[in-house]
Every structure is written in C-alpha cells, then in structure tokens.
Image (cartoon, grey):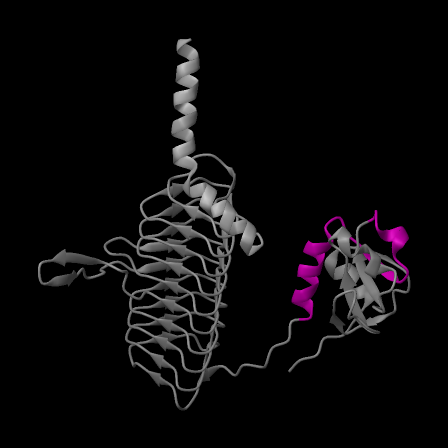
Amino acid sequence: MTVRDYSLAELAEQLHLQCVGDSSLRIVGLATLASAGSGQLSFLANPRYQKELAHTAASAVIVSRAMLPHCSVAALVSDNPYLSYAQASQLFKTSSAQQAGAHASAVVAASATIASSASIGAHCVIGERVQIADNVVIGPGCVIGDDVVIGGQGLLHANVTVYHGVSIGHSVILHSGVVLGADGFGFAPTSQGWQKIQQLGGVVLGDHVEIGANSCIDRGALDNTILGNHVIIDNLVQCAHNVQIGDGTAIAGCTAIAGSTRIGSRCTIAGGVGIVGHISLADNVHITAHTLVTKSIARPGSYSSGTPMLETQQWRKAAARFAQLDVWIKKLSRFIKANKQQ
C-alpha cells in the first residue's frame, strides 16, 4: 500500500490554491475538522461546521477567502473548498500495486484480446472475443462474458459480472457485485403463464462512468440500454431494459428506473426514487428523495412527492384526513356552485 506525503506548498501548487501559513508542513492524509490531527489536511465547505474550525487539530484546512480570518491554522484558500477537497482526495488515494497479466487461476478464452498492461485477478473468467484495453484492472472473481469490450484505465472490483455483448467506455469504475447486461424484465402474459421475451439488446457505458456496489443495469430488449459519459450511480440502483441516461447525471442509492425511460443530462436523482417506464426527463431535472415519478418532466427544476416524517399519532391523523380529501372537495365544489347561483 502506497502512503502519500506532500508539503503544504506542494499541495498548493498541485491544487492551484493560495497557501497561507507554514508552507513546509508535511501532510500525510485527509480528515474531518473534528477528527483531524497533526499531519492531516481538512476542509470547510459547509458553514454549519464553522465552529469546528476554531478547535481543529488539523495541520492545515482548505477554506474560502471569507472563512480565512476564522482559521487558526495554516490554510489553502479556495473558491470552492469542496471541489478542492475532492481534488486533494485523488492525491491521497491508496491502492495496492497491481501486477500486469493474468493470475494463474484465471480462465481466459484463447480468442480474447487483452492489453499487456492489463491485470486479471484470481479466479476470473474471461469469455470469447473479449477486448480489454490498456491498464484495465479486473479484480478477483469477475466474470466477463463473450464479446465484451472494456476501454482503457477501467477498474472492476471483485465479483463484478458483465454479461455478453456489453460495451464499457474509458476510465469506468464498477464496484463489487455490479451486474451489467442481465435480462430485462420482459414477459408476455398467456393463459398458461408468462412467455419470456428474449432480451436481444446490450448495455453501453460511456467514459468516466462509476457504478456502486450491487447495482444492476439490464440489457435492452431490442435496442441497447445506454449510460452517457460521466454518469455516476450509487449502490443498489436498478436500471431496467432500454433506459437511457444522459451525460453527467447522478443517481443515489436504492433508486429504481423502469424500462424505456429516458433521463436527460446533468440530472440528480436522490435516494429511494421510483421512476415509471416509458417517460422522459429533461436535462437539469432534480428529483428529491423517495419521490415517485409517474409522468414525463419537460422543464428543468426540482421535483418532489410524498410526505415528510411526522410523529406516528400526527401521521395517522393526517392520513385519515387525506383519505377524506375527495369528500371534502366535492362538498366544497357544491358549496361554491350553490353560492354562484344565488
């Protein structure tokens, strides 16, 4: 495991930030304001944590210029401290050294084309005619089906399953348990039961996509399921067959998207959202947590549904009143109509 070590001056140069204070300080890691100690760099992005700035034991903090007078330790001044923290985290990323080539226990089809710089972990299975580009790392236990293409610099963590005919772009990260290309949920009802519809499409991922643990992206029924460039998906997300997701969209955990829905670019979908099938969302749409999206959204903006938490007794009263709402609306309509006639 590689340990990173920078002077504060080196960090300022790499992050293009102004250094205030002792530039020779050695920084070996990142931590929160509350937990940081000597040799660690922290950040203040949310004003609600300003009180912790005065008491932090961090060697240095990334702060905005407005917060600089309140910082009692060395600082890196940023117009966007959260973005600068994200960039700093790349410098302190820890990773085990990966050896190029295939592990002795891996099963690799003779027709597969694998770059010499790629790393194939223990007990992997690589199917026929698979193409794996430069510097791809495939973790232990991954299964890559026939005719899969994986672009350069990709990282598949342990136990990822990629079905046949899937195309994966450049610099894609797939976390453990991800399944790409399983059959979509397609069945036709008959008098004897359900007739399976063969899913004949594939899955196409753009560049710089990241998909969280145990998320599933189903293959298309006829056309492909498509995720654009820079799409990020959290854990336990379901994307059904023929879903299309535009560039730069972010989807949080436990969201489920039904088949043939199109989601625009730069959208944010919060946790636990349900989106019905065969609708479309415009670019720059933002859906709050646990919303049920039942129709297309044509205009950018923030959308919500559902009710927030209440104490149980209050919620029961509110639920009872909600059930009576139709009766009261009808009474109100009759009252308004009667008054208009007078």
Residue 89 placement: quadrant: bottom right
At a point 40% along the width and 27% down the height, the residue shown is 331
Q: Is residue 268 visible?
A: no
Picture quarter with the N terminus: bottom right
At a point 34% along the width and 53% down the height, the residue shown is 258
Picture quarter with the C terminus: top left
Q: Is residue 75 magenta?
A: yes
Indicate left or right for 114 with 53 as reference.
Answer: left
Query: Residue 152, position in %: x, y?
Result: 47, 66
At a point 70% along the width and 55% down the height, the residue shown is 82
Query: Residue 310, position in %: x, y?
Result: 57, 52
**Farthest left residue in view:** 191
Indicate left or right for 167 with 116 as reference.
Answer: left
At a point 50% along the width and 72% down the height, the residue shown is 135
Residue 29 placement: quadrant: bottom right
Q: Is residue 170 above or below residue 249?
A: below
Q: Is residue 324 magenta?
A: no
**Segment tinted magenta in the rendering:** 65-92
Query: Residue 186, position in %: x, y?
Result: 23, 58
Query: Residue 33, position in %: x, y?
Result: 78, 64
Give whichever of 75, 307 is nearer the camera. Answer: 307
**Farthest bottom residue in view:** 104
